[in-house]
């Protein structure tokens, strides 16, 4: 069998096809795109996030605020990011209108709610292709955290009966989440980690106060598929209203995403740049 050599997107070093980003993404469930932001850009992004997210505790930026900042919103459309997404998902790319920045958000083991439950069996179909992207603005170290841990290869498993029942991620966290399949994703400030939407992941735990805020920028790419794209956005609209103890409340950011229309509600520069990159933005 002939082994093909390829050039990786992040280093320029020659590797075998078995180590290519597409192969890593298919087998491990994630890849790291190194140095999307340089040190000066990381500092600028941290400053901008701090300006928008001024409260205490965990916070999340409204998508309209994110899109209003050309520097932050332009990250998802950078050539290296788009090129890598196309390598992983295919040339017919869509960028969902879910872009945001988060401050001090720490979550337990999970697969994002949009991809679990009785309405999400389609995410296990052979044609499903969706990648979550996180750009972390600090190193992910084993003591202070700063990024995510994953269960390697869990996108090939099913923890919730292939979407037909409620997930039991607590069981997974107590078993394989503590096995050698668990990996701390070794991101450095300015790296983008791209992971399969089905991958089981958690915030890297903080063992000692890192002495700085945790910031992350998030967006997601998928393959153009009108049915799947509509299912995803429709589920966001459903999730925008949550009921607890008989009281319903609206989740502002999700409700806003459900109301966004492309291109009318997007900056003209963003629409032009997306078109130049052959990226479609689906909305309801």
Image (cartoon, rainbow, N blue to C red):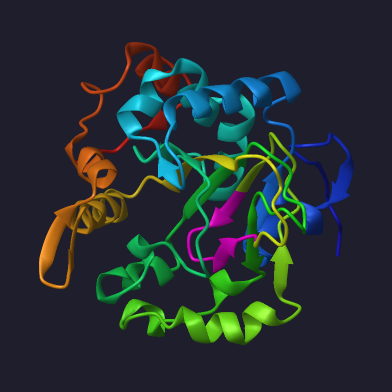
Q: Residue at x 67, y 23 (%)?
A: 43
Compared with residue 266, is residue 3 higher up or lower down, i.e. above or below? below
Q: Residue at x 20, y 44 (%)?
A: 255
* Closer-to-camera residue (89/111): 111
Magenta residues span 194-204
> The C terminus appears in which quarter of the rendering?
top left
Indicate the position of residue 232 as horizontal and vertical percent values.
Answer: 30, 54
Q: Nearer the viewer, residue 70 or 153?
A: 70
Establish if 174 lies above or below 195.
below
Look at the picture and state if 84 lies above or below 78.
below
Q: Is residue 195 magenta?
A: yes
Residue 274, given in percent of the width and then of the height, sits at: 42, 23
In depth, the one of 10 and 129 nearer the eye is 10
Q: Is residue 206 magenta?
A: no
Which residue is more in the foreground, 216 or 132?
A: 216
Total marks shown come to 0
| Residue 166 image position (x, y, % from top left) | 33, 81
Instruction: Please indicate whether residue 258 sits to the left or right of residue 72 in the image.
Output: left
Left or right: residue 141 versus residue 95 is right
At x 54% / y 27%, what residue is drawn? 75
For residue 167, which quarter of the picture? bottom left
Q: Residue at x 64, y 83 (%)?
A: 176
Q: Quadrant of the N terminus?
A: bottom right
Residue 79's x, y, as percent? 60, 25
């Amino acid at each position: 069998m002939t082994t093909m050599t390829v050039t990786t997107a992040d280093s320029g070093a020659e590797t075998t096809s078995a180590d290519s980003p597409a192969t890593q993404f298919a087998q491990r469930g994630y890849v790291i795109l190194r140095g999307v932001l340089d040190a000066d850009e990381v500092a600028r992004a941290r400053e901008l996030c701090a300006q928008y997210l001024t409260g205490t505790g965990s916070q999340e930026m409204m998508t309209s605020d994110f899109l209003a900042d050309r520097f932050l919103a332009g990250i998802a459309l950078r050539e290296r990011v788009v090129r890598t997404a196309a390598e992983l998902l295919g040339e017919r790319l869509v960028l969902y209108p879910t872009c945001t920045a988060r401050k001090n958000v720490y979550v337990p083991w999970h697969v994002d709610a949009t991809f679990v439950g009785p309405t999400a069996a389609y995410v296990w179909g052979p044609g499903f292709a969706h990648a979550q992207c996180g750009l972390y603005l600090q190193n992910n170290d084993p003591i202070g955290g700063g990024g995510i841990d994953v269960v390697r290869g869990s996108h090939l498993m099913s923890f919730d009966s292939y979407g037909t029942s409620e997930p039991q991620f607590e069981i997974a966290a107590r078993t394989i989440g503590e096995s050698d399949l668990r990996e701390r994703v070794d991101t450095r400030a300015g790296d983008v980690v791209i992971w399969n939407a089905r991958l089981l992941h958690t915030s890297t735990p903080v063992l000692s106060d890192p002495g700085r805020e945790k910031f992350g920028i998030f967006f997601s790419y998928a393959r153009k598929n009108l049915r799947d794209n509509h299912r995803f956005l429709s589920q966001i609209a459903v999730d925008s209203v949550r009921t607890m103890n008989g009281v319903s409340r609206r989740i502002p950011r999700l409700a806003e995403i459900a109301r966004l229309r492309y291109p009318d509600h997007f900056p003209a520069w963003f629409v032009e740049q997306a078109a130049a990159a052959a990226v479609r933005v689906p909305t309801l």
